[in-house]
Image: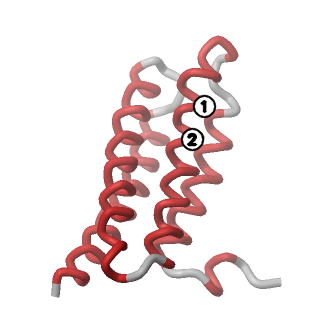
Amino acid sequence: MESPKDKHPPLHTELFELTGWTLDRTAAFPKSHRHTFGQRLDNLVLDALEDETRARYAPRAETVPHLDALNLKLERMRVMWRLVKERGWISLRQVLHVNERIDKAGRMVGGWRKSLEK
């Protein structure tokens, strides 16, 4: 069986893995905050994956708005994960990991966007 890495672009793979990681972390949030913080993060990461897919299949002229929406979602994720870390629901190591993944995805989005301007 093929893994997602075998047939998808690197940005899709990065977001797919970030989605799985996020869903695993948010499931462990305190029950009293799982709905607010967990749901919001889950939706952000799933929407980001959807934006990447839309950008990939959109006509070239319509790709940039999807990439801009994706980039904004990545920034919103950074803020949410920082809030989660401040509340002690994830470790410093985990927030560094997720920020590294978000940064990597952001660089890919930026490179893709820049390539469309040529």
Quadrant of res 43: top right
Residue located 59% across and 17% down the image: 33
**Hey, which quadrant is residue 92 in on the image?**
top left
Q: Secondary structure at mark 2?
A: helix
Q: Position of residue 11 (x, y in %)?
A: 46, 72
Amino acid type of the residue tagged 2 in the rendering: Asn
How packed is label 1: few (under 14 Cα within 10 Å), some, or many (20 or more)?
Answer: some
The circle on residue 39 is 1
Depth order, front residue of 40/34: 40
Check disc 2 and report the residue beneath it. Answer: 43
Name above or below for residue 88 compared with residue 98.
above
> Which residue is at the far top?
32
- Residues under numbered marks 2 and 1 in contact, where contact means CB atoms less than 8 Å apart: yes
Q: Which mark is residue 56?
A: none
Image coordinates of residue 104 in percent, x first then y, are 36, 64
Left or right position of 64 against 23: left
For label 1, the SS is helix
Q: Locate residue 63, reporting x and y percent.
A: 36, 73
In this rendering, is residue 111 above or below 65? below
| Label 2 to label 1: alpha-carbon separation | 6 Å
Furthest residue in direction left, as rendered: 118
